[in-house]
Amino acid sequence: GESVGLHLPTLSVQEGDNSIINCAYSNSASDYFIWYKQESGKGPQFIIDIRSNMDKRQGQRVTVLLNKTVKHLSLQIAATQPGDSAVYFCAENRAGGYQKVTFGIGTKLQVIP
Amino acid sequence: DAGVIQSPRHEVTEMGQEVTLRCKPISGHNSLFWYRQTMMRGLELLIYFNNNVPIDDSGMPEDRFSAKMPNASFSTLKIQPSEPRDSAVYFCASSSQSPGELFFGEGSRLTVL
């Protein structure tokens, strides 16, 4: 079926190192992808998005890479900080009408001081 | 802007009781979403509205669940009768673009005993 899944449920990273969170998607019709961050007790918060006509997009300390050939999405966080500790979700949306955003299971990022 | 506002933040009820969760989207947003989050199933889309009209309710678990959006500034999610397996955090989100960023509320944590 159509689903978004994550390879790693938990990722531990030393403060200052770079983090890479991976995500696989299965819906070939999806053409818009989003990364969300969820801190404990809060709702998900938008980080960065990318459309399927792009391979890479950069934000502040974050980069999203999209490989449509293998249906893979990744989020790179540079110089990881304690405040980056959270659960990260990739989500996909099929553009062109319905805004049906489907979320993956999530990856927990633990930053070690 | 105050963001998406949900109430109650926490609710504990007994099996068989009616539960009503409320959401006030961000002013000017024309799409509203209800999600349910559990450890086992992650973030599940229950229903979403566009311009106050339900567009897709295929995620609503069963007839015990119903959602309404009587106007652009208010939506409810009702569970009647509630069951222990309905225990979860219920999130409301709104959006002004399609596709685009979803703005989530803080969630309503429901515990059904």
Image: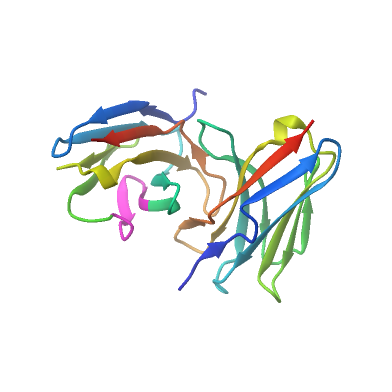
Q: Which residues are magenta?
A: B46-60
Residue at x 57% of width, y 45% of height: B101
Q: Using residue B24 as the reference point, say whether residue B1 is left or right of it.
A: right
Instruction: Answer whether residue B53 is magenta in the image.
Output: yes
Q: How is the image coloured?
A: rainbow
Residue at x 45% of width, y 40% of height: B93
Q: Is residue A49 above or below residue B19?
A: below
Instruction: Answer whether residue A92 is magenta in the image.
Output: no
State the image coordinates of residue A36 (x, y, percent, origin top left): 60, 45
Residue at x 71% of width, y 67% of height: A53
State the image coordinates of residue A79 (x, y, percent, origin top left): 85, 39
Q: Using residue A64 as the reference point, say whether residue B50 is left or right of it.
A: left
Q: Using residue A87 as the reference point, say whether residue B11 is left or right of it.
A: left
Dominant secondary structure of the residues highlighted in magenta in the image: strand
Frontmost residue, A97 versus B105? B105
Quadrant of the snapshot with the C terminus of chain B: top left
Q: Using residue B45 as the reference point, say whether residue A23 is left or right of it.
A: right
The number of discs equals: 0
**Residue B74 visible in the displayed image:** no
State the image coordinates of residue B40 (x, y, percent, origin top left): 43, 52
**Residue B86 visible in the displayed image:** yes
State the image coordinates of residue A87 (x, y, percent, origin top left): 60, 43
